[in-house]
Amino acid sequence: MNDPGPANIPTERSNRPRTNVRWPKAEHPDGTGPAHGARSTHNTPLTYGTCAPYDETAACAAGPQDGSTPATTDHHGLDAHTSPAAADARGAALRPSGTPASASARERADKLWARLCRAARQHGPVLALYGAMKLIGFCVFMYLLDSSGDFRRKNPRFGGGAHVWDVLATWDGWWYQQIAAHGYHPELVPIPGATGLITLEGNSAAFFPLYPALMRLVSSCTGLGLLGAGLVVSIAASFVAALAVYAVTARISGRRAGLAAAGLWAVWPGSGMEWSGYSESLYIALAAWACYAVMRRNWLTAGLLTCAAGLTRPTATALIAALTVAALVDLLRDRRAVHRWGDIPALDGTARRDAVLRPLTAVVIAPVGLAGYLGWVGHRMGDYGGYFELQDGAWAHSFDYGRHTLKVFSSLMVGHFDYLYAYPYEDAIGAATVLLALIILPLLFWLRPPVVLTVYTLLTMALVLGSQQIFGNVSRYLLPAFPLLIPCATAMRRLSTPVLCSVLTIAALASGSYAGYVLFEVGIP
């Protein structure tokens, strides 16, 4: 019997480096000891793409005695790792009958736990910072509501209620609860004898369906009332949105800037709507992750998220346009690269087709939600422009190319409040928010963000500033323009953690007043 010492090193005919190829130990059929050939003792020449011959049947029959997966060799004769699925299958084949089958399951569980730990280390500080800042502002908001007590004298539908938390689901929140409880009844009902701006009765068809649908689903699954279910949806979506704001910013300016952006989003002037019975948090979560998916070129994911955003708010028009422009730019860039460098497609030709079909599919999917809802409302009303008639006639909301915004600014400068829906305190905060956004916008362009963020931000601001609506709500309407936070977060990334937390805490204390109390009690959110 040969000496069972170290195996000789197999060599190739070419000048490739020598490598040790270890084969599984085999035993005699009678189990008396190592069999001849348990380790290679022959200087067997190897050719490229082949390895030293061995008895496959004997190796598989022997296998490792500890249930682990044996080392394999790649097509160069070098040690290589198999894929998890192949390792599990081969381990099951080589495992003796007495070895427990749960070893591979424990390995998968360990890997899953390691991934969860990495995710917690990466995203835990983001969620903690956002939650802390938002909780500070929310507590200030609730304290101011309770101290003033004005909500107790108001109609529960218009900013009132028996408890402070009832205020969170008034105004638009009341409509969402009605939709969740009773569904839609789209119609255009004229107000008898009305000749002013408001000529139609308000109707639930003005509010998009995804948020009330989730309210009803959560209420059915948890037993909560519609108010509690709506708050659960909004709060959960706000944390998802904070992660998306972090991810987008971190991809441009680093993780430290992403952390600052998540904190800033918690104290933006319109952030009081994030933990309320409104659809802002849900829409921003969908829009921000859709932008991130476009940045990663995950086109189908971006298309589906944009479609869902179109079922949440009409301002998804900006997101649909941004995705379309980004897809066309990507196709054009790819076409130029092919002309310049030449195309090397996969053997089956699928790589080239996917590079074209996936962006185009996203462009087709993206507007389905928005167009589908508007088409359904128009069909039920008997007028395919019925949604816009309802917005104009029942709420005096229409696109006027910025005439109303210009009148508000010109009136505020001279101390006049003779424009539509004048609320001096709320309008002053709205005007300051608009000026801040206009200052930040060139700084965003200076960072050269991806085209999807540029188009999305510009169109969101154009839709907000170009519409006739309650101007005091402009801080809320600009909340979806989250890329405006990126320049500020980029500048704040140099701050130490204590200084960053201190600055955000002061802003959170103020946001409880201007982002919560002012919107819900001083004006109309």
Image: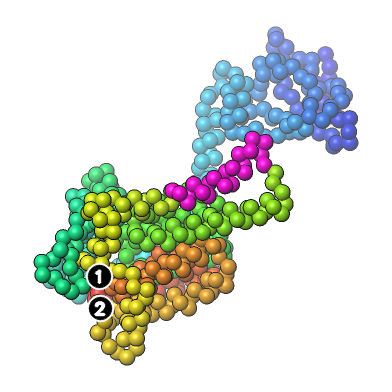
Residue at the spot x=24%, y=77% of the render?
421
Tell which of 338 and 184 is nearer to you.
338
* Disc number for residue 420: 2
The amino acid pointed to by label 2 is Leu
**Furthest residue toward front:** 383
Local crowd at mark 1 within 10 Å, few (<14), some, or many (≥20)?
many
Relative placement, left or right, of 106 versus 160 is right
The quadrant in which residue 396 appears is bottom left
Name the spot of residue 168 as percent of width and height, x first: 25, 63
Residue drawn at (71%, 23%) of the image: 24
The question of residue 449 being in magenta is answered with no
Residue 175 is labelled as none
Residue 21 in view: yes
Q: Which residue is mark 1?
A: 396
Q: Is the stretch drawn in magenta largely helix, strand or loop? A: helix
Residue drawn where x is 59% and y is 47% of the image: 355
Q: Which residues are magenta?
A: 345-365
Query: What SS does tag 2 mark?
Result: loop
- Reply above or below: 314 against 430: above
Which image quarter: residue 166?
bottom left
Which residue occupies the foreground of this view, 354 or 36?
354
Residue 344 image offset from top left, x and y in percent: 70, 44
